[in-house]
Amino acid sequence: MSMFGGIDTSASGLTAERLRMDVISNNLANANTTRTPEGGAYHRRYVVFQPREYDEQKGFGFFMANALRKNRKNRDRGNGVRALRIEEDRRPGPLVYDPGHPDANAEGYVERPNVNAVAEMVDLITASRAYEANVTAINAAKAMATQALDIGKS
């Protein structure tokens, strides 16, 4: 991995966790939505991630490709993450008896969203901590690069 590979990897993590926090925020915002354009109650969404594939024609890895050719086995490690898709959790939400609600069925039950606010907040805190960890890794890589440049000055 090049000197900037760590920054590139952490940057992909920042992007992924930001998307994850946006999706969680959307879930929390729709925790009481019983009518969607698709019909029915809102169903929570979640992000599916996958490891990024190594591509020596993109990013800083292109400049260090010759150094990595000797150790091809490790080239696929530590290249970051990307969001593959945003999925919808199709599990039904709880049914609440409220015959006066405009979205109630014939028996008087309303399907509530399948969003658990406590679980979403835990996921939000987890995503926030992962974001912070990636920022810390980028700052450490920047500090190492700065110190390496300072070595050349003396």
Image (tube, rainbow, N blue to C red):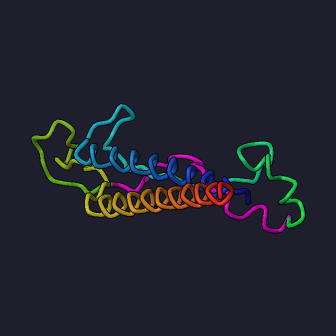
Count of picture labels: 0
* Residue 107 point in image, percent of width and height: 19, 48
In the rendered image, is residue 101 in sight?
Answer: yes
* Residue 124 point in image, percent of width and height: 35, 57
Q: Residue at x 73, y 56 (%)?
A: 2
Please give left or right for residue 23 compared with residue 118 in the image. Answer: right
* Residue 108 point in image, percent of width and height: 16, 47
Q: Residue at x 33, y 47 (%)?
A: 25
Magenta span includes 82 = yes
Quarter of the figure with residue 106:
top left
Q: Residue at x 36, y 31 (%)?
A: 37
- Choose between 5 and 20: the one closer to the eye: 5
Please give left or right for residue 115 compared with residue 63 in the image. Answer: left
Quadrant of the frame with the N terminus? bottom right
* Residue 26 point in image, percent of width and height: 34, 44
Range covered by the magenta-colored residues: 72-92
Q: Residue furthest top?
A: 37
In the rendered image, is residue 50 in sight?
Answer: no
Magenta span includes 100 = no
Quarter of the figure with residue 40:
top left
Please give left or right for residue 123 compared with residue 34 in the image. Answer: right
Q: Residue furthest front?
A: 154
Quarter of the figure with residue 145:
bottom right
Quadrant of the frame with the C terminus? bottom right
- Choose between 135 and 95: the one closer to the eye: 135
Q: Is residue 34 shown above or below 130?
A: above
